[in-house]
Image (cartoon, grey):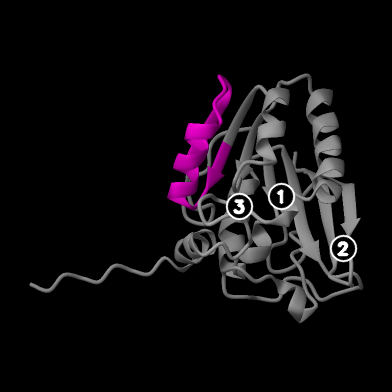
Amino acid sequence: MTKKAKKPWPTKDAMNQIYELNLWGGSEFDFYSGSGSHDPDIINPYLDVLTAFLESHNRTLTVCDLGCGDFNIGKQLTQFTKKYIAADIVENLIERNKQIYQADNLEFHCLDIAKDELPTGDCIILRQVLQHLSNLEITNAVKKLENYKYIILTEHIPLDPFIPNKDIISGQGIRLKQNSGVNLLEAPFNLKVNNETLLNEYTLDNEKGRIVTKLYEVF
C-alpha cells in the first residue's frame, strides 16, 4: 500500500529557511531574528514600556511570548514576570535558546500558534510575528488569544493610512509592499477588546513604515 504523502507545513518550512539561510542577517553559525530584535533605537523604548507594564503588576503575570525568536528581547523581560513561556515554530532555534537561557521561571516550547494549543497565561506578547502570517493563520491564532487578559501586539505597518489585513503567503515578507498591515480589530479578524492603549511607536528611516506596539485588554 502506498504511503500518503505528508502534508506540507509551509510556515514552518519558511521560518526554518529564514534562519538556515540567515535571511534576516547575522552569522551563519547562529540564529538571528533581525535588526528589529537588536537595534537599540528600536528595542530600548520597547523594553522600557514593557518593563513598566510588567512591573506595574508586581511580577504576578504569566507571560506567553509567541514567536520569541533568538530571545534577545525576552531575556530582558523574564525577571519581571511570575513565569515566562517563550515559544517559536523553529525547533532548532528553541533547542538553542534552551541551552543559552535558563531561569527558574522560564520555559521554552516549540509550537505553531495557528495550529497548536497555546500555553495558559495572563498576557500574550506577539512582536512582529503576525505580519509574516497569512490571514487564515492569523484567524486561527486570534481565536486562542481571546483566552488571555492582555495582548501586547507589535506590528510593522505603513506610515500613511492603509487598507488593513490584505492577505499574503506566510514567509519572510510582510504586507508593507501592498500598503497594508495587520489590524486585529478589523475584518476578517474582528478581535473584541475592552481597551486599546498605544505603548510605543517607532518610525523607520527612508519611509520604510513604523513599528507600533499596542496593549489590548481583552477582559
Please determine whether, in this image, residue 204 is positioned above or below residue 49: below
Q: Do the residues labelled 2 and 3 touch (CB within 8 Å)?
A: no
Which quadrant would residue 208 be assigned to in this image?
bottom right
Q: Provide the residue designation for mark 2.
A: 204
Image location of residue 109, percent across then percent down = 48, 40
Q: Provide the residue designation for mark 1.
A: 37
Image location of residue 12, percent across then percent down = 47, 61
The mark found on residue 32 in the picture is: 3
Residue 106 part of the magenta-drawn span: yes
Span colored in magenta: 86-109
Question: Please, what is the three-letter code of the amino acid marked with disc 2?
Answer: Leu
10 Å neighbourhood of mark 3: few (<14), some, or many (≥20)? many
Q: Of label 2 and label 3, which has the lower sequence position? A: 3
Question: Please, what is the three-letter code of the amino acid marked with disc 3?
Answer: Tyr
Q: Is residue 95 left or right of residue 127?
A: left
Q: Distance between the residues labelled 2 and 3?
A: 20 Å
10 Å neighbourhood of mark 2: few (<14), some, or many (≥20)? some
* Residue at position x 48%, y 33% in the image: 99
